[in-house]
Image: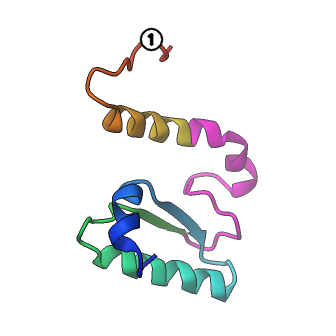
Amino acid sequence: MQRDWATLGPKLRGKLHIYCGTLDNFYLNRAVKLTEEFLNTVTNPPAEAEVRYGLDCEHCWNGDPNLPNHISRLRYNTMYVPMILEHIKNSAPEGADLKSWRY
């Protein structure tokens, strides 16, 4: 990613959302930390990425700080669809129909 940021950055800007439980294994946690450090340093373009850590949470922590994973993973759609819709709205071409499919 670092080597190819000039090409990848414009495509990934604002699209990276990384969630990691702090009780995950050392190697995954280290990879997430290194990725976060890299994403925080890029400026052309800025990553605009989100990296969140679930304190004392296990593997596959999904970003919900209020519920345990075994419950929150049952509601991924209610957690992420609003983020997806916001991205569609913000990146739609001028004049795109953003109303007829939202009900």
Q: Position of residue 48 (x, y in %)?
A: 33, 60
Q: Is residue 67 left or right of residue 34?
A: right
- The residue nearer to you, when weighing 34 against 97, is 97
Amino acid under disc 1: Ser
Q: Which residues are magenta?
A: 54-79
Report the side of 50 relative to 40 (left or right).
right
Residue displayed at 57% across by 52% down: 66
Classify residue 91 as left or right of residue 78: left
Q: Which residue is mark 1?
A: 100
Q: Is residue 100 magenta?
A: no
Q: Is residue 72 magenta?
A: yes
Image location of residue 27, percent across then percent down: 65, 87
In this view, 34 is above or below 20: below
Q: Secondary structure at mark 1?
A: loop
Quick one: label 1, few (<14), some, or many (20+) residues within 10 Å?
few
Q: Residue at x 48, y 17 (%)?
A: 102
Q: Position of residue 76 (x, y in %)?
A: 64, 43
Q: Residue at x 67, y 40 (%)?
A: 75
Count every numbered label the image shows and give the total: 1
Image vertical order of residue 95 relative to residue 85, above or below: above
Residue at x 70% of width, y 49% of height: 73
Q: Position of residue 59 (x, y in %)?
A: 71, 70
Which quadrant of the structure image shows residue 96?
Answer: top left
Which quadrant of the figure has residue 54?
A: bottom right
